[in-house]
Image: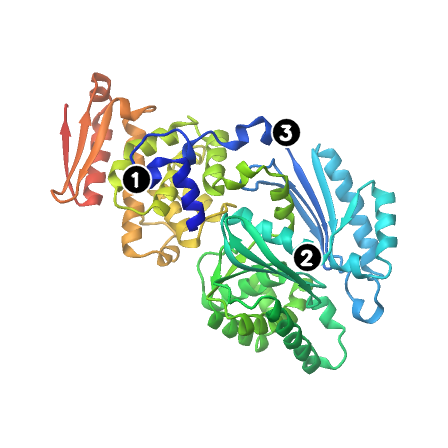
Amino acid sequence: MTNAMMRQAELADPMLAGSGTKADGGLFGTPLFEDPKARALARVGVIDIGSNSVRLVVFNGAARSPAYFYNEKILCGLGAGFSETGRLSSEGRPRALAALKRFAALAKGMNVSTLVTVATAAVREAEDGPEFRAEAERETGLKIHVVDGREEARLSAQGVLLGWPGAQGMICDIGGSSMELAELLGDGQVGQRETSPLGPLKLQGLKGGKKAIKARIKATISELGETFPSKPGRLFLVGGSWRAIARIDMERRGYPLKVLHEYRMTRKDIRDTISFIETSDLDDLRGDTGTSAERMRLVPLASLVLKELVRAFKPDEVAISSYGIREGLLYEQMSEEQRQRDPLIEAAYHMELANARMPGFGRALYRFIEPLFGRVTPARKRVMRAACLLHDVSWRAHPDYRAEVCFDNATRANLGGLTHPERVFLGLALQHRYKSSRKGTQIADLTTLLSDKDVLEAEILGRAMRFGAMFTLERPLDHGELKLYPKKGVLELRLKTDTGRDLFGEVAQARFKALAGAIGADSVVKGG
């Protein structure tokens, strides 16, 4: 969680700032998807006409964390051969037009409330780009907006902000025919923006072979370095070619969590992976990583660009963003209030409302167990809040597999604002919500992303949710209160009502003892 996000959360919810005030605002305030203005954007569609692919994405509303109602792409290669001809690909053009006809019909059938169609480098630079645009608009009824390079950079940066509110550093979005850079200044601001002709489809046709391509890349990135003189702390990579390289990096390292969003690499990781690509059979890499043949053909050229990019800009860290221009267009539809919300908490709210047996209990459960975690960081408390909201969303799964389903859902869900270790922590806590032991589960590799302390804390959280959900079905604080005395090694439950004493039956007693055992404390019950 970024410092900016934490500041916003603390201002909205005094509990995050440590005041102890039981406010209803902030991270546990009214979720914005309940706002009529948000519901009015029932389905937001984006058609992205790129140099390599044409894609339709339909978001299920403009909630703070994107929900993908529909997602389809066709690798048309509109920009293939541009360096030689200056025109759109003769093979790609009819394929792109057919894709646009299909997407327009699909959007109409889905009752998309807002549909935005954008075209980027290939259409804006090709000699026959205006002709193709006019034909496509005539044949489909779509209104196509051709964005310039700096606007493309801004929209891609906004896509990154959708997943990382308050992100700071630089984004680099590589397409088929161009590569865009933009500064992220923090607090949601996009700074300097620039475009360059470093897309792999454009580099393919360069005369002079690999030597000429390397020289062009080095010269272009050197020019970009004059525009962006400051070293970025974090470089956010956007685009299919970057994601393909990151997937190869995962394969090379034996990385256990195959989620590309928020995947982190060092400059050394990138150098080692590029060397790995140069010495590997591309067909073997394609099979091992599930990358399409069309994408894999672009990887060697994209890797040359990335190698020079990290050499010149020397970022402290490189992060993969699955969010880009399409998500940036969704971000464009949002109010400033929506933009300031935490995407993780908003998504967890939405999942609880849609899938939990008792929507709203997650908030009460968090208030009940929160005294056990007084010493954890605000960032960790944020993940704990999400866990409480999600603690019951997998109840329909078969009881024998419910714990594993919880873990899989959390670690693989399309959630923004969540690092890979946080994903595993969340999944592990939710697994312990339904199962005391990790024996017989397939999670050992993933827990290597956590420290032993984190693993124990996730188990304690899971056991706390397991007990709290058993103790009472609503408003547990009305009937009992937890107190932890770390120095004394005592976990205390104060029963406050006759109903609370009745609810504290045999199973609840056993789960309370198990929770105390995980903490390493003695269990004490008062008022029983």
Q: Is residue 517 above or below residue 223?
A: above
Q: CA distance from mark 1 to mark 3?
A: 36 Å
Q: Amino acid at mark 1?
A: Gly
Circle 2: element type: helix
Q: Is residue 40 left or right of residue 5?
A: right
Which image quarter: residue 375? top left
Q: Determine the residue positioned at 23% across, 26% down.
A: 480
User: Which residue is under mark 1?
Assistant: 18
Q: Determine the residue positioned at 64% across, 66% down.
A: 296
Q: Amino acid at mark 3?
A: Ala
Pick the quarter of the image with the C terminus.
Answer: top left
Nearer the N terminus, badge 1 or badge 3?
1
Q: Is residue 458 above or below residue 480?
A: below
Circle 3: element type: loop
Q: CA distance from mark 2 to mark 1?
A: 42 Å
Nearer the N terminus, badge 2 or badge 3?
3
Q: Determine the residue positioned at 68% across, 82% down.
A: 211
Q: Amino acid at mark 2?
A: Arg
Task: Report whether residue 491 is seen.
Answer: yes
Which image quarter: residue 109? top right
Nearer the N terminus, badge 2 or badge 1?
1
User: Which residue is under mark 3?
Assistant: 40
Mark nearest the camera among 1 and 3 is 1
Q: Determine the residue positioned at 35% across, 40% down.
A: 16
User: Which residue is under mark 2?
Assistant: 150
Comparing 344 with 15, the one in front is 15
Q: Residue furthest left?
A: 488
